[in-house]
Amino acid sequence: MWSFRKAALGRSTGASRSAADRRRPAASFRRAAVLCGTLLALPLAGCLQPLYAPAGIGFDSSPLAAELQAIAVDEIPQRSGHYVRNDLIFGLNGTGSQPPPRYRLMVVLRERVQTPILDTVTGRATSATVIVDAEYRLVTLPEEVEITKGVAFNVASYDRFSNRFSNVRAARDAEIRNARVIADSIRTRIATVLAARLASGPPPVLPN
């Protein structure tokens, strides 16, 4: 009886060891694959850089960031214009510093509301769409030389309810969403143009 148990125990231990031996190469292969992937990714760690990212240690060390911070945004009428201007100021210069302006940004908003879906029973609109066009123009100071211009466009929809205050809050949220998208679009376009100007260098001075 004792010999039978000892033989069975030996076979069980041998089977466990053989299974563990089979798992070791797979685990070693996975560790080697992870290590190789990490080593291959290290040379690319510093190759990718966002459009507005600073080139040096501090935010002010980026020439493009300094150009964006030097843009003065004109007042934009109405509540939507207030939202767009605030988002533009924060997006162009989120440091809180006030460098001397070298550019002037003018934005004209055109906003309209559409009600594409109506309740056939009550005759009231169940949803609304806020459409905003933003015509912008960037000029230098004090020469007023035009750098770039264009039109940014966005659409935001919201549900309408029987409660008037809920409708007012939903409409304002749609305006805020429109303002964020439009400000980000304008900032991206302006940054692209200024980055191209910095890459090409200052324009040549013509003799009198």
Image (cartoon, rainbow, N blue to C red):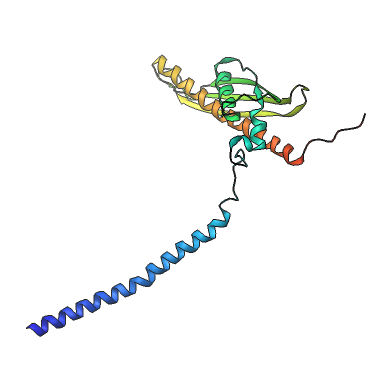
Q: In x, y percent, where is residue 72?
A: 66, 23
How many numbered marks have been drawn onto this rendered protein structure? Answer: 0
The one nearer the camera, 31 or 163, is: 31
Q: Is residue 50 left or right of residue 201?
A: left
Question: In which image quadrant can residue 1 be found?
Answer: bottom left
Q: In x, y percent, where is residue 34?
A: 45, 61
Residue projecting furthest to the right: 208
Residue projecting furthest to the bottom: 3
Q: Is residue 156 left or right of residue 163?
A: right
Q: Quadrant where the C terminus lies? A: top right
Image: 39 above or below 89: below
Residue projecting furthest to the front: 57
Q: Write the residue at 65% across / 19% down.
A: 74
Question: In which image quadrant can residue 84 be found?
Answer: top right
The one nearer the camera, 124 or 201, is: 201
Image: 47 above or below 173: below
Q: In x, y percent, where is residue 79?
A: 55, 16
Q: In x, y percent, where is residue 119?
A: 43, 22
Q: Write the residue at 76% across / 27% down.
A: 146
The one nearer the camera, 121 or 88, is: 88
Q: Write the residue at 42% across / 68% down.
A: 29
Image: 164 above or below 184: above
